[in-house]
Image: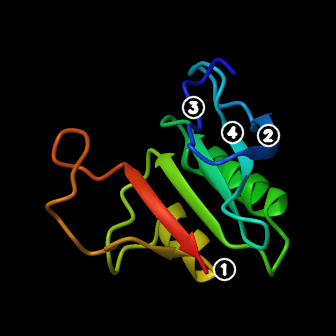
């Protein structure tokens, strides 16, 4: 993948794949890496590393919808992390808040203003589904 995502684990992984998402010209290609991590003989966890476009909100919304389609198994535990290029501010409608409202995922410390990643903005996120 040419969008700078990776998954490293001390546990075995399977079903690993790289997914290109809807293009967002003029930015370079974007997407996510998805792998199933086997924690033990009975437990697994899906881990996703994302890098979405910064240029267009509607394209980022499409990219999040594509991610949600990839992860439709309701019984799988999931960690999604990476550069969403979206601030997800409390009380402001944006694609991160929309995604969280329309999915079973919860953001790690959504309202924490100390977790900035670029020019006093929080563009990187961790979403969990247990």
Q: Position of residue 77 (x, y in %)?
A: 68, 73
Contact flag, marks 4 and 2 (Cβ < 8 Å): yes
Q: Earlier in the sequence, mark 4 or mark 2?
A: 2
Identify the mark at residue 16; answer none if there is no mark: 2
> Which residue is the site of mark 4?
33
> Which residue is the site of mark 1?
102
> Which residue is the site of mark 3?
5
Q: Earlier in the sequence, mark 4 or mark 3?
A: 3
Q: Is residue 75 left or right of residue 62?
A: right
Q: Position of residue 11 (x, y in %)?
A: 63, 48
Residue at coordinates 24% horizontally, 39% vertically from top-left?
Answer: 118
Q: Earlier in the sequence, mark 1 or mark 2?
A: 2
Q: Position of residue 66 (x, y in %)?
A: 78, 53
How far is the residue under mark 4 from the one under mark 3? 6 Å
How far is the residue under mark 3 from the one under mark 1? 24 Å
Q: Closer to the camera: disc 1 or disc 4? A: 4
Q: Position of residue 45 (x, y in %)?
A: 68, 64
Q: Secondary structure at mark 2?
A: strand
Q: Closer to the camera: disc 4 or disc 2? A: 2
How far is the residue under mark 1 from the one under mark 2? 25 Å
Q: Secondary structure at mark 1?
A: loop
Q: Quadrant of residue 109?
A: bottom left
Circle 4 Cα neighbour tier, 10 Å, few/some/many (<14 / 14–19 / ≥20): many
Q: Earlier in the sequence, mark 3 or mark 1?
A: 3
Q: Secondary structure at mark 4?
A: strand
- Residue lying farthest to the front in this orientation: 41
């Amino acid at each position: 993948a040419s969008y700078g995502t990776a998954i490293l684990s001390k546990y075995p992984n399977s079903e690993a794949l790289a997914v290109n998402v809807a293009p967002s010209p003029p930015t370079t290609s974007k997407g996510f890496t998805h792998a199933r991590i086997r924690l033990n003989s009975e437990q697994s966890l899906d881990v996703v590393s994302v890098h979405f476009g910064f240029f267009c909100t509607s394209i980022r919304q499409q990219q999040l919808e594509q991610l949600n389609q990839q992860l439709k198994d309701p019984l799988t535990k999931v960690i999604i992390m990476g550069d969403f290029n979206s601030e997800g501010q409390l009380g402001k409608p944006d694609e991160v808040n929309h995604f969280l409202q329309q999915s079973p995922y919860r953001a790690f410390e959504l309202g924490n203003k100390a977790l900035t990643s670029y020019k006093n903005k929080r563009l990187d996120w961790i979403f969990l589904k247990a």
